[in-house]
Image (tube, grey):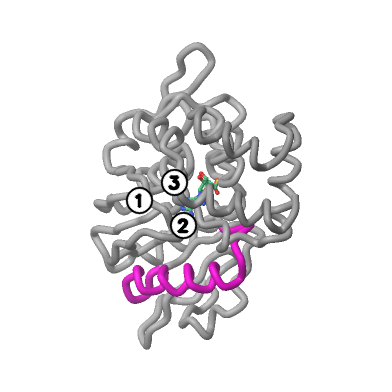
Amino acid sequence: MTDQEYLFLKKKVLTMTGIDLESYKTQQMRRRLSAFIENTNEKDVIHYCRIIEQDEPSLKKLCDFITINVTEFCRDAAVFQELENSILPALLEKRDYINIWSAGCSNGAEVYSIAMLLCENRKKVNYRILGTDMDELSLARAAVGGPYRDDLMKNIPKHLVDKYFTQENGDYWAKKEIRDKAVFKRHNLLADKFETGFDLIACRNVTIYFTEEAKEKLNQRFFESLRENGVLFVGATEFMINAAKLGFGKFGSCFYQKKNSASLAKV
Ligand SMILES: C[S@@+](CC[C@H](N)C(=O)[O-])C[C@H]1O[C@@H](n2cnc3c(N)ncnc32)[C@H](O)[C@@H]1O
């Protein structure tokens, strides 16, 4: 793909999907998109752009490809154990209500994983989980709680699968108990306004292809959206280089806490 073609594609993608490729690492995105377009057998980028203008499913395929919505329940099981055993108890210690945001929640597996941990917690707190994503199809699945394939469930202990899911034709559906406190809405992390007042924000495996500038801006905005002592939960391979500069302290493997003078006990 030539520089000009990439520029043309970037403009087209922005106007048609609202996704600004400026915030994604150029080399990787360009390489991935070149391979993707080659696979469609279209002659070149210009021809491909004509297709996405006319054909909704092709546009949808492109969006899915750019955003990558692979997920599973309790992704990185050891980290979810840490969330259950250290982070949530610390957050719940002095509170009867917590407000959580799963940003880039895909089909809701992350939202319902956290909901299960809260339902299982000794302290019965009230909570709300907001799940947001750019991908409407994933969100539609999240809102009705399924269907989830068997292979997405492998990290959930059997007794919890039985307790919180029903099974239908080999697929799983989240029960009302974990669906009740979840709210889903479409939201673009690179363009839309953020709510505030969160105790926990999970943004995991979403920013892999974002530029360092976009990531820093996003982390700054997450900081502003968190309450004092609130925690940002990132993916297992996502390290925040400038955490201290932004005002975060590191807590455990994948957790950053918005620091203040009276912070939580270090875990
Ligand atoms: C790989 S999935 C991660 C899902 C879940 N957080 C996890 O770790 O399993 C990445 C999700 O981020 C969403 N996403 C990517 N870019 C986004 C953006 N700019 N705003 C909102 N969601 C975005 C994708 O649609 C996709 O569902």
Please name whichever residue, 153 or 43, is drawn nearer the observer in this view of the structure. 43
Front-most of residues 26 and 46: 46
- SS label for mark 3: loop
Beta carbon of the mark 3 residue lies under 8 A of ligand 1:
yes
**Residue density around tag 2, few if under 14, some if 14–19, many if 20 or more, within 10 Å:** many
Residue in view at x 53 percent, y 30 percent:
158
Identify the secondary structure beneath mark 1.
Answer: loop
Q: Residue furthest top?
A: 169
Could you tell me which residue is drawn at 58 percent across and 55 percent down?
79
- Marks 3/1 in contact by CB < 8 Å: the verdict is no
Disc assigned to residue 134: 3
Q: CA distance from mark 3 to mark 1?
A: 34 Å
Q: Residues within 10 Å of mark 1 (few under 14, many from 20)?
A: few
Q: Amino acid at mark 1?
A: Arg
Q: Which residues are magenta?
A: 207-230
Residue receiving disc 1: 122
Magenta region includes residue 199: no
Q: Which mark is residue 202?
A: 2
- Name the mark nearer the viewer: 1 or 2: 2
